[in-house]
Image (cartoon, grey):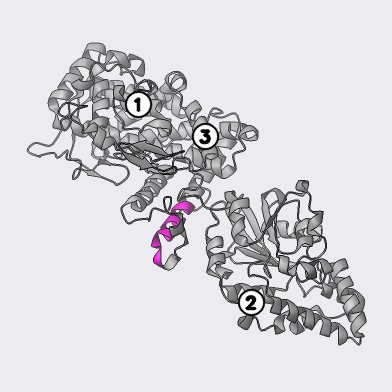
Amino acid sequence: MSLIRYLPATPNDNRLVVWFDIDNTLYPPNQRIVDLVQGKIFQYFVDLDMEPEEAKILHRRYYTEYGLSVRGLIQHHDVDPLDFDAKVDASLPLEELLTPDPTVRRLLEDIDTSKVRIWALTNAYKTHAQRVLKILGLEDLFEGLVFCDYESKDFACKPERKFYDQALELAQTTAEKSYFVDDNFGNVRGAKWAHCAFLYDAALDAKALAGTGASGGVGNIDDLKPEDGISVIHRLEDLRKVWPKVFKTSVYGDGFLFQQDIHKWRAGRKTLVQHFAPAVMKSKNVLLQEAESVQLLYEFLHQPEGFMNYPMRYTTSVMTCLLYGLRCGTYRDPIIQEVEESMRMFSELLVPGGKPPVEVFPLLNYLPAFISPWKDKCKRLAKRVDILYGDLVDIGVQRGMKGLNSDNLAYKLRLGKESTGLTHHQEAFICGVALEGGTDIVAGVILTCLLALISHPEAQKRAHEELDAVYNEETLPRWEDEQGLPFVRAIVKEAMRWRPPVPMTVPHRLEKDDHYGGYFLPKGSQIFCSAWAIHMNAERYEEPELFKPERFLSHSMSMAESIAQGDPFKRDHFAFGAGRRVCPGIQKAEQDIFIALSRLLWAFDFCAPAGVSISTDFSTAFVGEGIRMPKKFPLVVTPRSQKRVQTIEHAMHLAEETFSQYGRYNPTSPLG
């Protein structure tokens, strides 16, 4: 046997492999082709000076004993296998008998190649296999082809275990990661160590059981036992039901944020809720946030012109430390650059017209690629995040195994794999979605606070007075004093109400029929929570268009505590969603924002350049579709005193000890 690669091999490729037989599998069984093949094989036996009855008996015997008639001919009659191929398969008028089937192509296109490789596995010689794939218009969808090498007389074939073992070796995969579909029952039984599907065609069953090689080959479907683990399908489309995990579920596949598979969603959310629980964040992780915030101050102090980038470095570094045991020392860190580019690409898909609502109308998935440019964008985005998230989760696991940052989420997911059943891809995307949600959204809120304060200097003055009453010039604000800084806390809450980072929150899906406001909402309907509409409701917030932090002075609860009440009318705001899909990292986000803002206000005066008017209009001063954040605005940053500068410098020196506990990311694969 040998192989042809249509795509270069990727080192350490851990994706699953779906193996497709070719003849009578990728196209419906064609009785004329079956009859022609049997006739040509029979004639080949007769041409070896056999009587017709002897030829018929030996044909069946060789097929049964050797898997292919040609192997028996080689063994007992010393025939040239290439001569046999030329007079049988190569002589078939396939161009007249086969036509491309759009439904088969769509099925293969719908396989999630971010986590699955598609290979062909055939008992035919390479020229026949390539010819069939080309006629069917499927050649470009396969990464590799394993075939019987007729140039070597001692070749193996299906259903021999040797053939399958060699195929796994050539594809650099394992039985556990293999899914195999064939129309030949004998071949399927021989591969039952993998996940198998038998494409059963009743019309050809008689010939199959006769052992002529038309379809079923050796064995009887009636012998199938439940413990064999073989799925019987009657058309390739049935694979969507028996192997749903190999197909795309949405733009983000295993990302749990928009996950429609409730079991995947629950597993992912439970893990994130536990990892970012308020008790954990307040006790174990606040020191990391405070250390990273010191670098934020240091960056504002020494290079204030880059202020738009520093909150992103700060929030991303905190998150990567918690997820993988890696930190981002600069804004140019490859993790930050990749996350920003991926979020930009994702936002393009969220723009009206950027992508059709395939989650609502799945049939739109079947539109051909030439009128669906969004499909190519989705594939490019999937490739980027697969490489990044896969690399990062592997590094996190490796660090944990070495005893480094062993409380990182990637490592904890791997330790719990036996109980959760999560795949590597699911682990990567649980961490990846947390990375996305805990970086640019939170960074945008910090920038929104600064924009609001330079537009409302009276609020900044009041915050300075509150901070100065609690801290001297040698002491940085701490999270533990949050309750003693009600106005700073109120600024954070009001900024998220006034300019919510996600105006239209993550959609929810009804589990059963419902009625609301006189409308009937059927099961499966998507429900959106408009944070913007709620926040601009004058019955709920007096003068909602104004930035007024004092409206939250009496609200002493944290955002997480406010949500936990269960009463939406007592909520502070809805910037981080509502219901089951509310952001699981709320406590981490609130601590990020409060620590950063309280320390920035303690250290600096912020204002617009003299004579420059600053816009805070949500439609013109902010950018983004699903996620809104301020456009670049002019900002003058002035240290409040030289003593505070010295305090920052000293704190930065001390923070290096915390930073040294974490690694840095060096991409092992080309990103994008």
Give whichever of 263, 395 is nearer the camera. 263
Q: Nearer the viewer, mark 1 or mark 2?
A: 2
Q: Earlier in the sequence, mark 1 or mark 2?
A: 2
Please tell me how crowded label 3 is: few (under 14), some (14-19), or many (20+) other residues with Cα within 10 Å: some
Position above or below: 240 against 73 = above
Query: What segment is highlighted magenta in the picture?
Result: 371-383
Q: Quadrant of residue 599?
A: top left
**Label 2 element class:** helix
Locate the N terminus by quadrant: bottom right
Residue underneath mark 2? 131
Q: Are marks 2 and 3 in contact (CB under 8 Å)?
A: no
Q: Earlier in the sequence, mark 3 or mark 1?
A: 3
Label 3 to label 1: alpha-carbon separation: 24 Å
Q: Earlier in the sequence, mark 2 or mark 3?
A: 2
Residue type indicated by callout 2: Arg
Residue type indicated by callout 3: Arg
Position above or below: 268 against 207 = above
